[in-house]
Image (tube, rainbow, N blue to C red):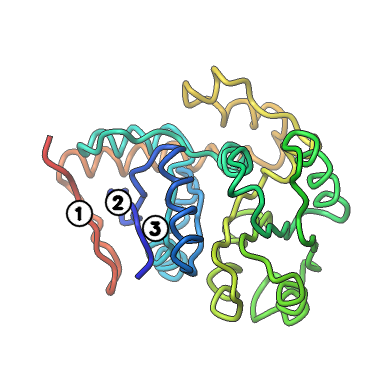
């Protein structure tokens, strides 16, 4: 059985109550034990998307780990009584895994990004983490990521014999892709890191650390990509706050989908 960290019920989505070190330990345990699972790195926007998409919510709740990418989710978990929870952001998780010499030496594969981004990412990560060399990269054609199983991607992954596949297709596309494709592979862990491909390759700037810690990364990203992100954030933030208030006041509950279970709270 796949090792799973404890989860908090955040509006019906099970968010893993981990910190960065705990997330790395979980992935290491999967490699040690020969497990097969996928990791969703979730922010408030994704939790809101799950409210009206039962399939997407089920994909998250059946993942081996759903890390809190965003301080609102961290604060929500802490408010439920889960201690030791901190933000586990895609770029940080990728770097933390590669900073471990034992994990760095495993067979990594970079899947996603625009043409050329994965190659740039491989070079940059090799510079930052000496000895890192992925066993392959692949940028699926956009049409191949929408639905169904991408046989070309499966063939490339089989040929590489990859153990860890970093998936940068953007959310929620990458979560759907991992859930569809993992059962057809021998991959130990698929990890959906989205914009980490652009950030770590140097294609896009990252928010300063103080903004990330204060829960203001959304503001930085909105300032750098207003046309693409304005609609997302102006809808997501009020919706998340409103549903959190309803939960806190007991006016609404968010049970998990059938077949999923996780505690709603932990005693303080």
Cβ atoms at labels 1 and 3 below 8 Å apart = no
* Residue 36 in picture, x, y percent from top left: 49, 69
Q: Which mark is residue 16?
A: none
Front in this rendered view, residue 2 or 267: 2
- Frontmost of labels 1 and 3 is 1
* Residue carrying label 1: 263
What is the C-alpha distance between the residues marked 2 and 1?
7 Å
Spatial separation of the CA atoms under disc 3 and disc 2: 18 Å
- Residue at the extreme left of the image, as rendered: 267
Mark 2, Cα crowd under 10 Å, few <14 / some 14-19 / many 20+, is many
Q: For mark 2, what is the residue? A: 7
Q: Quadrant of the C terminus?
A: top left
State the image coordinates of residue 45 (x, y, percent, origin top left).
49, 46
User: In this orientation, which residue lies closer to the viewer: 41 or 182?
Assistant: 182
The disc label shown at residue 51, or none: 3
Say whether disc 2 or disc 1 marks the residue closer to the N-terminus. 2
- Labels 2 & 1 near each other (Cβ < 8 A): yes
């Amino acid at each position: 059985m796949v090792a799973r960290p404890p989860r908090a019920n955040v509006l019906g989505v099970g968010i893993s109550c981990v910190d960065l070190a705990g997330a790395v330990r979980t992935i290491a345990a999967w490699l040690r034990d020969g497990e097969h699972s996928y990791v969703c790195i979730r922010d408030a926007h994704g939790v809101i998307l799950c409210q009206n998409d039962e399939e997407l919510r089920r994909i998250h709740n059946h993942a081996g780990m759903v890390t809190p990418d965003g301080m609102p989710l961290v604060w929500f978990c802490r408010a439920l009584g889960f201690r030791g929870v901190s933000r586990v952001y895609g770029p940080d998780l990728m770097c933390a895994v590669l900073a471990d010499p034992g994990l760095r030496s495993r067979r990594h594969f970079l899947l996603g990004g625009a043409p050329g981004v994965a190659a740039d990412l491989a070079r940059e990560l090799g510079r930052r983490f000496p000895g890192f060399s992925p066993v392959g990269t692949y940028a699926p054609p956009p049409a191949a990521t929408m639905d169904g199983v991408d046989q070309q991607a499966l063939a490339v992954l089989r040929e590489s014999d990859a153990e860890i596949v970093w998936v940068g297709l953007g959310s929620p596309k990458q979560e759907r892709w991992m859930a569809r494709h993992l059962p057809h592979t021998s991959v130990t862990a698929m990890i959906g890191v989205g914009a980490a491909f652009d950030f770590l390759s140097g294609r896009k700037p990252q928010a300063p650390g103080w903004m990330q810690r204060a829960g203001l990364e959304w503001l930085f990203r909105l300032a750098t990509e207003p046309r693409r992100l304005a609609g997302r954030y102006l809808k997501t933030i009020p919706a998340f706050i409103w549903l959190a208030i309803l939960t806190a006041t007991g006016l609404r509950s968010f049970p998990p989908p059938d077949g999923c279970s996780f505690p709603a709270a932990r005693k303080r």
